[in-house]
Image (cartoon, rainbow, N blue to C red):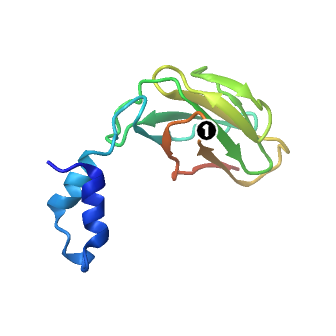
């Protein structure tokens, strides 16, 4: 079967792109590395935020492949949250903070399963509202789908 490059060229030169059949899209996508670990695309998945306690909310982050299977590899990514939030390693102790603990911008390394325990704290202790957490790649990260934003609601 044709490789992804030739199929993409065929798509580019197709005068009526609406006529592209599903089987052509399948052939293009099947050659792109979506597997787990090195060479694939990993997806940021957030667990359900826990209850607020002592001005902090804990949540689990899990990196998966595009099929929602465990990433199965320690991975370095960046986490950023909105003010007045700060972040640290949560009580679940999955993963490692490389830098930025106690700030709104951290570099973290997930555990070998692609998991990280996150604690988000309202640094003012008076917020009634939301603190958002976004994940993003670093120069050493794999291709990362980080479109999902974590919302922590403080009451």
Q: Does any portion of residue 46 appear in the rendered image?
A: no
Residue 85 image offset from top left, x and y in percent: 76, 44
Vertical position of residue 29 compared to residue 93: above or below: below
Q: Residue at x 47, y 35 (%)?
A: 63
Q: Residue at x 29, y 62 (%)?
A: 9
Vertical position of residue 78 compared to residue 155: above or below: above
Q: Residue at x 60, y 44 (%)?
A: 136
Q: Does any portion of residue 25 appear in the rendered image?
A: yes
Residue that label 1 marks: 51
Q: Quadrant of residue 65?
A: top left
Q: Nearer the viewer, residue 42 or 54?
A: 42
Q: Quadrant of residue 31?
A: top left
Q: How many marks are shown on the rendered structure?
A: 1
Residue 87 image offset from top left, x and y in percent: 72, 36
In the shown orientation, is residue 4 left or right of residue 73?
A: left
Q: Nearer the viewer, residue 127 or 105?
A: 105
Q: Residue furthest right?
A: 124
Residue 57 image offset from top left, x and y in percent: 66, 37
Q: Nearer the viewer, residue 126 or 39?
A: 39
Vertical position of residue 122 compared to residue 18: above or below: above
In the shown orientation, is residue 51 left or right of residue 24?
A: right
Vertical position of residue 76 compared to residue 82: above or below: above
Residue 42 image offset from top left, x and y in percent: 44, 39
Q: Residues within 10 Å of mark 1 (few under 14, many from 20)?
A: some
Q: Secondary structure at mark 1?
A: loop
Q: Residue at x 41, y 28 (%)?
A: 37
In the shown orientation, is residue 94 left or right of residue 5?
A: right
């Amino acid at each position: 079967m044709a490789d992804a490059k030739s199929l993409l060229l065929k798509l580019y030169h197709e005068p009526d792109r609406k006529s592209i059949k599903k089987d052509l899209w399948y052939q293009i996508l099947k050659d792109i590395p979506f597997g787990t670990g090195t060479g694939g695309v990993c997806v940021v998945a957030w667990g359900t935020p826990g209850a607020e306690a002592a001005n902090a909310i804990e949540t689990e982050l899990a990196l998966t492949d595009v099929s929602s299977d465990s990433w199965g590899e320690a991975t370095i990514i960046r986490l950023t949250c909105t003010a007045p939030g700060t972040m640290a390693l949560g009580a679940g102790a999955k993963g490692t903070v490389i830098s930025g603990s106690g700030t709104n911008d951290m570099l973290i390394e997930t555990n070998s399963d692609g998991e990280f325990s996150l604690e988000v704290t309202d640094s003012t202790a008076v917020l009634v509202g939301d603190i958002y957490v976004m994940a993003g790649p670093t120069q050493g990260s794999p291709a990362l789908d980080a479109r999902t934003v974590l919302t922590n609601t403080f009451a």
